[in-house]
Image (cartoon, rainbow, N blue to C red):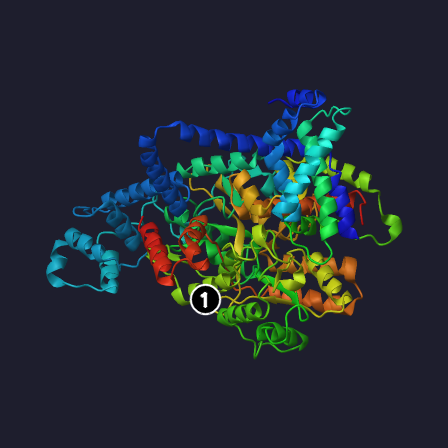
Amino acid sequence: MDDSKIIELFFERSEQAIIELSKKYGSICSRIANNILNNRFDSEECVNDAFLGVWNTVPPQRPNSLGRYVCRIVRNIALNKYHENMAKKRNSLYDIALDEITECFPSAVSVEDEIETKEIAGIIDRFLDALDQQNRILFVRRYWYSDSIGDLAELFHTSRHNISVRLSRIRKSLREYLMKEGVSL
Amino acid sequence: MKKEKVSAIIHQIGDRHIEEAAVFALEKDRRTKEDLLSVKAHGEKTRRFRRSIAAACLALLAVFGSAAFAAALEIREYHTAAAFFETNGLSADGLNRRDVKAVYRDITTNRFSYDKTAEVLRQAVPDWEKRQSEPTSEELAALWNRNFWTDPLPSEDGSTESNDSDFVMPVDTGALTVYGCETLEAVLSPAVDIFREEYPDVDVNYVRLSEDEFDVRISTELSAGKGPDLLFCLSRDIPDPYRTMTVRLFEDLDPYFENDAGFGFENYLGEVMNCGVLNGERQLVPIEIQIPLYQTSLEAVSETVMPDAVRRYQEYLSEAGEEEPSGIIQTFEDFCSACIRYHEENPDGMLFPAGENGDDLRALLSASGMQFIDYERGLVTVREEELHTILDVCRAFRSGNGQTVGADEKQTDGTKKNAFLSPADSDPAAVLSELQDTRRKGETPCLFPIYDVDGGITAEVLSYAAILRSSQNKLNAYRLLCILLSEEIQSGQCRTGAEDLHAWFPVLKSAVVRNTMSAYDTRFSGISESAEDAQLFIDTCTSVTRASMIPNVMMRTLYLEMTPYIQGEKTWEECYGRFLNALTLYANG
């Protein structure tokens, strides 16, 4: 079903909206949550909370892209849950992807060198714009969706090693790009 | 703190990128579901048959990688062999297709050890049969050399090959075609820029392709004996580079290098450059490698399990002037034993940190330096004991679902402290920084190589270059190849202004030194510990003795046949037998 039709169902306050939303985006939402939390029970809870979040906010909101909207909500909820759980152990794909990408950011010499989060996100957006589509998607799938190397190899019909090499080179380019832009954390 | 901020930054990546990636994955899911539905729509009667066919195809693909590519190579090799028989007046009567190729390989590699070769020569030299009933390889070689086969061996295009002393550099055609894609861009693009600057009269056709287009185009064109003038690709872009070399698809580069006064193999790491030599011809040249260099800290692994090799290597490097690393355990087996001991004391610990380098089997196999096939003789050469040791390590570190603990799909605790080893970055600045960070945390850092099964250090080739025999612009291809091997590109500090080009280790010794000292001078100058670290990094990298490639086909076959052993589902004998059979089939194919 088209996003616009699902949104109409939300506006009509029809429970069918949740069913259609789940049908279309349930799988991707579960994967995002599970990549971050590595716990099926917690992930299901996050997805349910996210769907409830959509129910509570649409209307009045009318998102341009329902998929993007629900993905952001579920990621937000999963990250909050992750920080709650984080106490001792890191145990998810999210940790690994975060470790990888953190290495790209040069360390600041002093606090004054820090740039605002949003501004850096904008710089990364420009960097992504300059990549070819495949590599851009690869980067986002790895570091935003926290997909595993194995899943990415399957998604891109290639070997795990090829994915690793590509990601490594993208990270290297990103690091250079961030340095040129004077970004440090 | 830094991680939290990075997490917040990544979370704010623009909507358009998030949506694009979501749509891409959803589309893939949709297609997969459609495929499944279309299969379901077929009747039960045909389903079983189709499933069998699909399973057979999958098995074939798994064993042979790109089946079409392999088939094309086989056809090409057979035609070359048949032409060789015809040119030299040899009879193929009584020989099957495989024998014809084997005899051809046997003669052209000067081995004369294949049993059918003697029979072929007997038929060609009737008088000789009466004089010699069971000739040795040496006698057969002598027979070949002194009889009417005195002409040089024919090449695939029918022309005769000259020996090195007669070699004349190809003429400048004023053109060059080369293919690139995003993964290769970082290295290839500045190399092409330098080429354009040095040879402004040459018309360079630099074809930029997407990753997928690159793979498809290379596979398709190479199997037809065509392609760019200079092939520059990752070692896994071709299912089996060694097999490709057996059909002599690429130019022998030795005569080029020998006639080039400006080139010296002694400037490159150990025997690394020889990994592309097959049947006496240097067909491939490595451009980037991965050195089995690892980091850990004494505190991260307990004293009892700390491999002596690590500790003593540290001591050795601190003893200035000592030339031989006396007392160092330089065996792969000892290293594997240390891994097992570590696992016994840390059942939840990982061998390598989860993530992109978390494939235990691949990392260990690569470091071991083992090759499964002798491509020159078409023989399987698996070292069973060593392979068994590697798989036992993987088996010990496997998790509940049978995957190795290092695999990122199923890790337990990803802190570096809970992993035995962490692969060292090829960027010296990152390594020096990591070692300093470890000290800041109050720990004692270690940086050391894993020795291969022969006591050396084997690097894995990550990218290589080759000139196609069919190239019309060989001189310009060779010029670009030399630029890829030059200090400018190898050190990543070239005139184009691009810096730090390499994601991986260079093959040129001086580039290792230059990169490391540059990193030290820029960021760590004056820190005495970092000076030692820099020297340690240089020493280790320049100690590499050789390089090898692990063909995709081999890895796939290994995973396919040996995973049940790693998962504890089948015995060694069952799995190893199947693995050997698959390899034998492939080696004789």
Within 10 Å of disc 1 (Cα), the crowding (few <14, some 14-19, many 20+) is some
Q: Is residue B228 visible?
A: no
**Residue that lies at the very extreme toward the right in this rendered image:** A112
Question: Looking at the picture, which amino acid does disc 1 mark?
Answer: Thr
Classify residue B444 as left or right of residue B287.
right
> Element at badge 1?
helix
Percent position of residue A148, x then y: 59, 46
For residue B39, above or below residue B410: above
Residue A49 lies in quadrant: top right
Percent position of residue B31, x then y: 51, 30
Q: Is residue B321 visible?
A: yes
Query: At x 81% / y 45%, what residue is drawn?
Result: A182
Percent position of residue B205, x then y: 56, 33
The foreground one among A87 and B212 is A87
The foreground one among B242 and A178 is A178
Classify residue B37 as left or right of residue B206.
left
| Chain letter, disc 1 residue | B
**Residue that lies at the very extreme toward the left in this rendered image:** B130
The residue tagged 1 is B389
Percent position of residue B188, x then y: 60, 42
Query: At x 48% / y 35%, what residue is drawn?
Result: B217
* Number of numbered discs: 1
For residue B181, above or below residue A88: above
The foreground one among B74 and A148 is A148
Query: At x 71% / y 33%, what residue is drawn?
Result: A52
The foreground one among B110 and B182 is B182
Classify residue A96 as left or right of residue B152.
right
